[in-house]
Image (tube, helix red, strand yellow):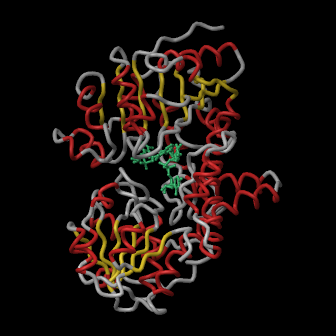
Amino acid sequence: MNEVKSIKNICCIGAGYVGGPTMAVIAQKCPHINVHVVDLNEQRIDDWNDADLDKLPIYEPGLADVVAEARGRNLKFSTDVEKAIDEAELIFISVNTPTKTYGVGKGMAADLKFIELCARQIAQVAKNDKIIVEKSTLPVRTAEALRTILHSTGNGVKFDILSSPEFLAEGTAIRDLHKPDRFLIGGEQTERGEAAVQSLVDVYLNWVPRENIVTTRVWSSELSKLTANAFLAQRVSSINAISALCEKTGADVDEIARAIGKDSRIGAKFLKSSVGFGGSCFQKDILNLVYLCRHFNLPEVADYWEQVVMMNDYQKHRFSKNIIDSLFNTVSGKKIAFLGWAFKKDTNDTRETAAMYVADELLQDRAEIHVYDPKVTEEQIFADLEYLQTHRVGQYVEQGEVMSINEIRSLVTIHTDPYLAMHKAHATAILTEWDEFKTYDWEKVYNAMLKPAFIFDGRNIIDKDQLDTLGFEVYNIGKGK
Ligand code: NAD
Ligand code: UGA
């Protein structure tokens, strides 16, 4: 094996939901390594540097403490991409890889333009050999494209490319990073490649036991990430498919999850039926997988995975349709309270949140929507709804009418008090499983709502018997009436 490079300076390109928390934890656990996180987005960097830790750009339990410990010691956030690249022996690329919205592969393939830009910039700036780590989620064999770009300058600088995808989930990112089920590193099976892998293993070893660091070939690592997300999303779509059957038959989906989850071959996690999965990654990564399968002429495999996304679209649509059907076939002019907007609890992230798709379908029927979410800003909610008007995808929403932001603003109100959001509402819909919703005074809510007072619990978090007793008309996911 070649000499293993000892890492003293790390650069991370991309200060988002992955780059920020991941690098903060590396800096916390490796005080002897300087970690420099860079981004093109000045506002985001200013927020990461804000003295007021409540203003960090990401809401994530435990993150503020980690940043407080390391920032100013060995953790730095800046927009000086070139300097950070120049100084580092190891560079994480952690930029966004959204679904393409144009041209070849539109609506399916991952857009790699940000990745390519990073590679070109590294190639241009680097004066000595560097280890480049793919932290972003990428199509299998992206490392090959990176290698071509990086080695195109002919200036003799050598790059070792590793894949080390991130498996953290939002809301539990710090816990996931402190105690990962595994960190994965894919590297080349050459002496140089093995030495590069060992350099990154040595970084992770500062707090992760060796048996939790898995090493593989590069392509396996890249494809493991897409596969993990596809399997996780598939479990949610599978239990959601069963929820539809439960509603027809009177079986209870939560009881079924409990019963099958006891089977150690199945396991209890990721069996919570819901209004549909959201988040920036599940849908994007499965569509990317589907695109790759079609590219490699595997249509049956592509169709199999695509069904996971189709089932998720169906689940969101089923929820909105049930609200409209239950409210006597129209929600026009009716006040519908939304509890929650984030795609899951304990995050302020709203990318691909089921809430916006449900809202969009109800707005098409001219509902008046009143939203309360403990962490999502008014600005973000309107940005999501406006974005959807021109970016509707999926079998149930493609045809929707495009509404202007003024029309949307005339129909949507954002509240900071949940009781006001539900006051005189025709119906309350629970879109996110925030713990605080369980603690509300539901009798007070019942008295303030119009009758019949409908509750559509898209997360099955409120005790149905209690709500029934109070007099609510309760609709749950996967529970027959
Ligand atoms: P994000 O959009 O929150 O952050 C990406 C950041 O990269 C942005 O701030 C953007 O300004 C910056 N950026 C883009 N191009 C740049 C460039 N050339 N130079 C400097 N900065 C640049 O995205 P994210 O949620 O952190 O996701 C990043 C990657 O990690 C994606 O591939 C995603 O699939 C993957 N991932 C995300 C999660 C998650 O929970 N969000 C978990 C695991 C993996
Ligand atoms: C997911 C994966 O869990 C991470 O391992 C991965 O790193 C990440 O995607 C990524 O690549 O971005 P995340 O999207 O942050 O993490 O959150 P999850 O906890 O996976 O939840 C995703 C969606 O599924 C949420 O809308 C959640 O409410 C929903 N979900 C999850 C259910 O409806 N039921 C469940 O049982 C679990």
Give the x, y percent position of residue 128.
49, 18
At a point 66% along the width and 8% down the height, the residue shown is 1
Question: Residue lying farthest left?
Answer: 51
Give the image quarter of residue 237.
bottom right
Q: Is residue 41 left or right of residue 241?
A: left
Ligand 1 in which quarter: top left
Give the x, y percent position of residue 339.
34, 67
Question: Residue lying farthest front?
Answer: 469
Taking depth in this image into account, of 212 and 282 the one nearest to the observer is: 212
Taking depth in this image into account, of 414 and 153 the one nearest to the observer is: 414
Q: Is residue 208 left or right of residue 432?
A: right
Give the x, y percent position of residue 308.
66, 60
How many dots with numbers?
Answer: 0
Taking depth in this image into account, of 418 and 116 the one nearest to the observer is: 418
- Please determine whether, in this image, residue 75 is positioned above or below residue 359: above
- Please determine whether, in this image, residue 83 is positioned above or below residue 410: above
Give the image quarter of residue 241.
bottom right
Give the image quarter of residue 434.
bottom left
- Please determine whether, in this image, residue 234 is positioned above or below residue 358: above
Give the x, y percent position of residue 60.
34, 44
